[in-house]
Image: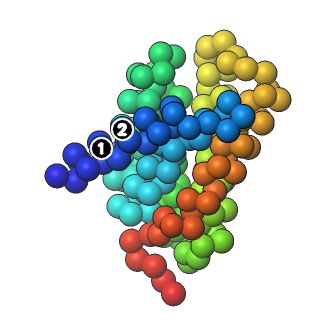
């Protein structure tokens, strides 16, 4: 049942991601699903859920399969790693960490697509898109809490 719920959440994130935009820049809501899986279920399950989300996103994008698989898997793993070993959750750190993993995800996807395929856009435009996506995702960090909040 939990996997069906995750599938619905992920496909809802994909639909919303495709229909929202700010200055023709779409938010990267699938990062939020991988991030939440990592902080909720731990490193291995977060990595697996993020990787599955990434491979579905890669297969739907029409580009080669791999960049989103790697980046979303890393987001799922790193979010769990950050909250289990380094941070005590609070809203400010939640906001900063969502912005940072969104930035890292965007850079990873851009770097891998540029390295193994043709460069999707120029480096300056890519940096602008990644920064705006990070800023759009940052407020969600206020609401994404780990499974055991240490007060």
Report the residue at 48% width, 83% height from top.
150
Q: Which residue lies furthest to the top in this view?
A: 118
Whether residue 111 is visible here, answered yes or no, is yes
Disc 2 crowd, CA 10 A, few/some/many (<14, 14-19, 20+): some
Q: How far is the residue under mark 1 from the one under mark 2?
A: 5 Å
Tag 2 secondary structure: helix
Tag 1 secondary structure: helix
Q: Nearer the viewer, residue 40 or 129?
A: 129
Dot 1 corresponds to which residue?
A: 8
Report the residue at 73% width, 43% height from top.
131
Dot 2 corresponds to which residue?
A: 11
Residue 38 horizontal/vertical position (percent): 43, 57
Q: Do the residues labelled 1 and 2 touch (CB within 8 Å)?
A: yes
Instruction: From the viewer's perspective, tell me whether residue 145 is left or right of residue 45.
Output: right
Disc 1 crowd, CA 10 A, few/some/many (<14, 14-19, 20+): few
Residue 140 horizontal/vertical position (percent): 56, 59
Please tell me whether residue 133 is drawn above or below residue 138 in the rendered image: above
Whether residue 77 is visible here, answered yes or no, is no
């Amino acid at each position: 049942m939990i996997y069906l719920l995750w599938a619905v959440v992920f496909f809802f994130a994909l639909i919303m991601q495709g229909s929202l935009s700010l200055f023709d820049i779409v938010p990267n809501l699938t990062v939020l699903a991988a991030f939440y899986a990592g902080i909720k279920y731990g490193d291995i399950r977060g990595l697996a859920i993020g990787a599955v989300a990434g491979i579905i996103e890669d297969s739907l994008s029409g580009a080669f399969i791999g960049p989103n698989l790697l980046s979303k898997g890393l987001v799922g793993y790193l979010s769990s790693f950050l909250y289990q070993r380094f941070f005590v959750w609070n809203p400010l750190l939640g906001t900063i960490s969502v912005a940072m993993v969104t930035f890292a995800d965007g850079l990873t996807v851009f770097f891998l697509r540029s390295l193994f395929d043709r460069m999707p856009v120029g480096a300056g435009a890519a940096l602008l898109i990644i920064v705006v996506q990070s800023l759009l995702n940052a407020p969600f960090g206020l609401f994404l809490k780990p499974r055991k909040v240490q007060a």
